[in-house]
Amino acid sequence: MSSNQFHGSMLQEAYTSGMNDRNNHYRRILNMYMRFHEAVVAKHDAQVEVYRISGKLELFDEIFNDGVMNHVKDKVEQEQIWR
């Protein structure tokens, strides 16, 4: 093996090793981003669920407290007393 071939193969190995290291580095960054994104989506889904339930509770309170269904509320309360 001549000196040129030896240096050429060393350069090729160094290049390949550098490319592999670079690819692994960016794969790790992508993996971290994907985990972060999944966490953000999960948090968003939880917040949407909280707002959905909160909205239902507000509507329920508004219906019963504004007198729209006071007679139903009174009836429910009376049934609770007589039980």
Image (cartoon, rainbow, N blue to C red):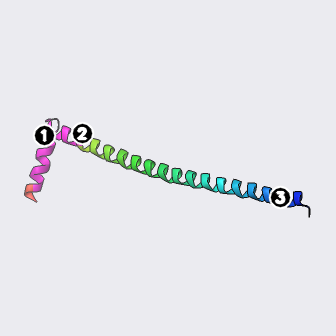
Range drawn in magenta: 58-80
Estimate the spatial distance between the alpha carbons at disc 1 and disc 3, rounded to whole Å: 91 Å
Residue, far bottom:
1
Q: Which residue is drawn at 32% across and 47% down?
A: 50
Q: Nearer the viewer, mark 2 or mark 3?
A: 3
Q: Residues within 10 Å of mark 1 (few under 14, many from 20)?
A: few
Looking at the rendered structure, the secondary structure element under dot 1 is helix
- Give the percent coordinates (x, y) of residue 39: 44, 52
User: Which tag, 1 or 3, sits closer to the chain's start?
Assistant: 3
Q: Where is residue 8 in the image (x, y as percent from the top left)?
A: 84, 56
Closer mark to the observer between disc 1 and disc 2: 2
| Residue at the spot 24% in from the left edge and 44% down from the top edge | 57
**Where residue 14 appears, x then y in whole percent?**
74, 57
- Circle 1 is placed at which residue position? 70
- At mark 2, the secondary structure is helix
The mark closer to the camera, 1 or 3, is: 3
Estimate the x, y position of residue 68 in percent, counting from the top left.
Answer: 17, 35
Precedes in sequence: disc 1 or disc 2: 2
Which residue of the protein is positioned furthest toward the front in this rendering?
3
Which residue corresponds to mark 3? 7
Who is closer to the viewer here, 17 or 28? 17
Dominant secondary structure of the residues highlighted in magenta in the image: helix
The amino acid pointed to by label 3 is His
